[in-house]
Image: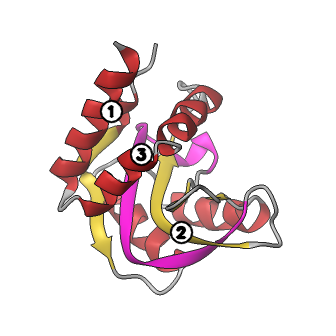
């Protein structure tokens, strides 16, 4: 069974990011992934293109989330980069691409072919439906805190 916590690393997490649009969020998270050796240069363009064609905004009960991802050939090592936003940015709704979603938290997923994207996405979607967890993540100051919150969630869920 894959553990979600294996994919989160404090150096890939940005809290309280001030961004004007999703492209700025993508660039910040892409740079974290690139600097730390998780993705290739081509990853950013892959994310941007895929987001245009297949939006990843998820309308939830309180805080909305986006889960941008792209093809495995842009990825060196699997990881999930995270940004919590000081004010929401607009994504298009995955369920209805015409509709805008104001997103507070972005989980940028970098998976190589060795991992089942479907399984990971299911686990992540399960996790983000936990409203209390999202609240905690949004309040977190720094990557270490976010990782701890996700670890404690994981322990509760899977015991």
Residue 105: give x, y in percent of width and height: 44, 62
Residue topped by disc 1? 153
Residue topped by disc 2? 103
Left or right side of 154 for 43: right
- Give the secondary structure at mark 2: strand
Q: Is residue 152 above or below residue 136?
A: above
Q: Which residues are magenta?
A: 70-93
Q: Quadrant of residue 18?
A: bottom left
Q: Identify which residue is drawn at 32% across, 41% down.
A: 8
Give the label, 3 or 1, closer to the camera.
1
Q: Which badge, 1 or 2, is on the more N-terminal residue?
A: 2
Q: Identify which residue is drawn at 59% across, 40% down.
A: 72
**Does 92 appear in magenta?**
yes
**Residue toward you, 2 or 34:** 2
* Residues at discs 3 and 1 in contact (Cβ within 8 Å): no
Q: Identify which residue is drawn at 51% across, 38% down.
A: 124
């Amino acid at each position: 069974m894959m553990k979600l916590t294996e994919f989160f690393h404090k150096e890939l997490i940005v809290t309280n990011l001030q961004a004007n649009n999703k492209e700025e969020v993508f660039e910040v998270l892409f740079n974290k992934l690139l600097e730390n050796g998780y993705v290739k240069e081509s990853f950013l363009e892959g994310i941007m293109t895929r987001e245009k064609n297949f939006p990843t905004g998820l309308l939830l009960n309180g805080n909305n989330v986006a889960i941008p991802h792209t093809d495995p050939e842009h990825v060196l090592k699997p990881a999930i980069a995270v940004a919590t936003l000081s004010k929401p940015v607009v994504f298009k709704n995955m369920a209805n691409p015409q509709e805008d979603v104001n997103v507070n938290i972005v989980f940028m997923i970098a998976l190589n072919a060795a991992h089942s994207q479907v399984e990971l996405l299911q686990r992540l979607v399960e996790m983000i439906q936990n409203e209390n967890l999202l609240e905690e993540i949004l309040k977190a100051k720094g990557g270490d805190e976010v990782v701890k919150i996700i670890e404690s969630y994981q322990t509760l869920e899977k015991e």
